[in-house]
Each structure stands twice: as C-alpha cells, then as structure tokens.
C-alpha cells in the first residue's frame, strides 16, 4: 500500500492498482460529530460517484464501501489533476468546454458536486473524470446549482487567474449545451455574485 495524496479530508492510498480513500479524524471536531460526519461523507461519496456515472459523468468505479472504517475503494484514474496541468495545456478552451459540459450533465440530473475545483478533475487519456463527491448531494434547486458553480468560479479565480476569462467562457458554453435551462442557474449565479460583493464591501 502506497500513500499517494493527503487531502484536507482524507488520505489516498494505492493498493493493488486501486484507490483507497480513508477519511481521517479531525481534532477540531467534537468526537461524536466527527465520527458521524466521516461516516456520512463516506457513504455519500460512494453513492454520488455511482449516480454521477449513471448520468454519463466519468467517475471512478466504486469497488467497495466500508462506512465503519470511513473508507471507499475506487478505481485508480491514471492521469493528472487539471489543477496541475492548466498552465501547460494547449487546448485549455476545449478542456473547459468539456468540464462545462459535464457540469451541465450533472446538474440536469440534479447531481450537485459540492467541491467543483480543478483538483477534483483528472484528465486521463483525453477524458475528464470528476472525483471527490463527499460534499455532494441530490438537489434540484437553482440555488444549489448556482452555489456549485460559484465554488468553481472562486477556485479558478484563485488558482488559474491568468486564464480566468477563457476558462469561464468555455465552461459556460459547455454548460448550456448539455443543460439549456442552466441559463436560469447562470442568472442566479450573477445575483449571488453581486450579493457577495455587496456584503464583502461592508
Ligand atoms: N480515483 C483516483 N484516481 C487517481 N487519483 C486519485 C483518485 N482519487 C483521488 N486521487 C488523488 O488524490 C487527491 C485527493 O483526493 P480527493 O480529492 O478525493 O480527497 P480530499 O481529501 O477530499 O482532497 P481535498 O480535500 O484536497 O480536495 C486528488 O486530487 C487526486 O490527485
Ligand atoms: Mg479533492
């Protein structure tokens, strides 16, 4: 077993060609709440990875779930996270058009990712896989979808600011293609951003 990443929430290990994701204890949480939260997110992630896949989103296959051990076993996606390769991508527009397409597909199925950042997207053999659904949910509301995209926008703004404009442009084109009524989500998003600015200025 080999440790391949240590995220904010979990350790990621490679075991016999598959990924084991184990959610680790957070000492700032009350112990009982910590246990409940880790168990809940473990189950939630396994469920949403499968649901997203049923909607045509590339995600790792879920091989096993052990809620009592806060562990899921999922297939290993060979490749690199978009976060690590954005700067060297030659087809940045094409890639984020596809990311938008996936987000739209997800939202048209009422799947909310919950942490839509480029470190949760892996480019593998020309396909983009979405991972890390532990904060996701099924929610049909426009607000939830808007919030999902707001997280994406904020993360792009802070990590890939040189490419911000072309990324957003391509993303929203892709989003609307696979989710035409996503225009309502984008309207709401604009409102949320104005609201955010208004509040952060005081
Ligand atoms: N199925 C997988 N195949 C390949 N690499 C993976 C897989 N799952 C996770 N990783 C790697 O491990 C990293 C952390 O995984 P993940 O995002 O699921 O955990 P996390 O603890 O929630 O992380 P963070 O809090 O940093 O978002 C990913 O960014 C990716 O590099
Ligand atoms: Mg992550």
Image (tube, rainbow, N blue to C red):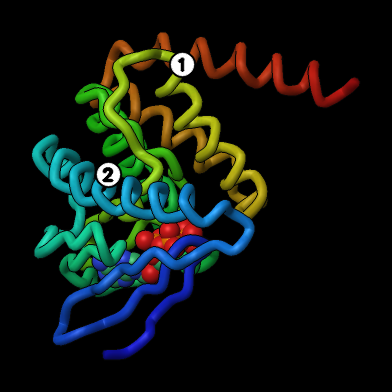
Q: Residue furthest right?
A: 202
Q: Position of residue 9 (x, y in %)?
A: 47, 61
Task: Mark 1 and ligand 1: say if the CB distance to the nearest ligand atom is below 8 Å.
Answer: no
> Does residue 103 sit above or below 35 in this rendering?
above
Quadrant assignment for the C terminus: top right
**Mark 1 or 2: the one toward you:** 2
Secondary-structure class at tag 2? helix
Q: Nearer the viewer, residue 53 or 187?
A: 53
Q: Nearer the viewer, residue 92 or 149?
A: 149
Total marks shown come to: 2
Is residue 82 in view?
no
Q: Residues within 10 Å of mark 1 (few under 14, many from 20)?
A: some
Q: State the residue position of label 2.
A: 44
Q: Position of residue 100 (x, y in %)?
A: 35, 36
Q: Position of residue 10 (x, y in %)?
A: 42, 66
Q: Nearer the viewer, residue 68 or 99?
A: 68
Q: Residue at x 27, y 27 (%)?
A: 138
Secondary-structure class at tag 1? helix
Q: Position of residue 196 (x, y in %)?
A: 71, 22
Image-based side of 67 in relation to 137, left or right:
left
Q: State the residue position of label 1.
A: 143
> Does residue 20 sit above or below 61 in this rendering?
below
Q: Residue at x 59, y 49 (%)?
A: 163
Is residue 40 in view?
yes
């Amino acid at each position: 077993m080999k440790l391949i990443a240590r995220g904010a929430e979990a350790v990621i290990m490679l075991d016999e060609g598959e990924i084991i994701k184990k959610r680790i204890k957070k000492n700032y949480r009350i112990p009982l709440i910590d246990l409940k939260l880790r168990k809940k997110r473990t189950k939630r992630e396994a469920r949403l990875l499968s649901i997203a896949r049923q909607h045509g989103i590339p995600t790792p296959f879920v091989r096993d779930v052990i809620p009592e051990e806060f562990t899921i076993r999922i297939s290993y996606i060979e490749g690199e996270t978009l976060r690590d390769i954005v700067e060297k991508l030659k087809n940045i527009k094409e890639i984020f058009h596809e990311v938008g397409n996936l987000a739209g597909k997800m939202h048209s199925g009422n799947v909310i990712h919950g942490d839509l950042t480029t470190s949760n997207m892996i480019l593998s053999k020309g396909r983009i896989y979405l991972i890390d659904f532990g904060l996701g949910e099924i929610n049909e509301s426009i607000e939830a979808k808007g919030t999902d995209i707001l997280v994406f926008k904020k993360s792009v703004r802070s990590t890939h600011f040189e490419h911000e404009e072309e990324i957003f442009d391509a993303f929203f084109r892709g989003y609307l293609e696979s989710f035409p009524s996503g225009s309502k989500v984008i309207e709401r998003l604009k409102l949320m951003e104005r609201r955010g600015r208004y509040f952060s200025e005081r």
